Image (cartoon, helix red, strand yellow):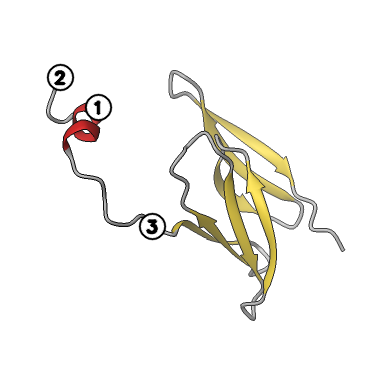
Amino acid sequence: MSRNSPAYLREHLPAPDSIPNVDDLLVDDEGMVWVGSYRADPSAPRLYHVYDTEGRFLARVAMPPDVDVLEIGAGHVLGVTRDALDVERVVLLELNRGG
């Protein structure tokens, strides 16, 4: 096993004292801030907390676990997924803002 392999590193490096609280930060086309929570399990949905332009909390949004968000519009989320061979595929998800 190579000393640079993920398996070797998981086995031999000490566990961190802390983990990040946030791992993604986006601003949509309306100026809303989307704060993506850190997830230890990459197969779990990514939870975003959405704040308005004044910093008021608006909503929690769960994104599919395999989608890397590229753009958030008024009624859509544009993202990319990767298959088992790491081939990228663009996805367009509907976003219902309510109201």
Q: Whole-Å distance between the Cαs marked 1 and 2? A: 8 Å
Q: State yes or no: discs 1 and 2 in contact (Cβ < 8 Å).
A: yes
Assign a secondary structure to mark 3. Answer: loop
x, y percentage for residue 97?
79, 58
The residue under label 2 is 1
x, y percentage for residue 95?
75, 49
Q: Residues within 10 Å of mark 2 (few under 14, many from 20)?
A: few
Residue at 65% from the left image edge and 63% from the top image edge: 29
Q: Whole-Å distance between the Cαs marked 3 and 1? A: 21 Å
Q: Which mark is residue 20?
A: 3
List the single residue furthest toward the bottom: 54
Name the N-terminal-most of marks 3 and 2.
2
Q: For the residue marked with disc 2, what is the amino acid?
A: Met
Residue at 52% from the left image edge and 33% from the top image edge: 43
Assign a secondary structure to mark 1. Answer: helix
Q: For the residue marked with disc 3, what is the amino acid?
A: Pro
- In the rendered view, would you say 18 is above or below 79? below
x, y percentage for residue 12?
16, 35
Name the N-terminal-most of marks 3 and 1.
1
Name the N-terminal-most of marks 1 and 2.
2
- In the rendered view, would you say 55 is above or below 32? below
Residue at 25% from the left image edge and 46% from the top image edge: 15
State left or right for residue 54 relative to residue 69. Answer: right
On the image, which quarter does residue 90 sit in?
Answer: top right
Q: In which quarter of the image is the C terminus?
A: bottom right
State left or right for residue 65 relative to residue 24. Answer: right
Q: Whole-Å distance between the Cαs marked 3 and 2? A: 29 Å
Q: Residues within 10 Å of mark 1 (few under 14, many from 20)?
A: few
The residue under label 1 is 7
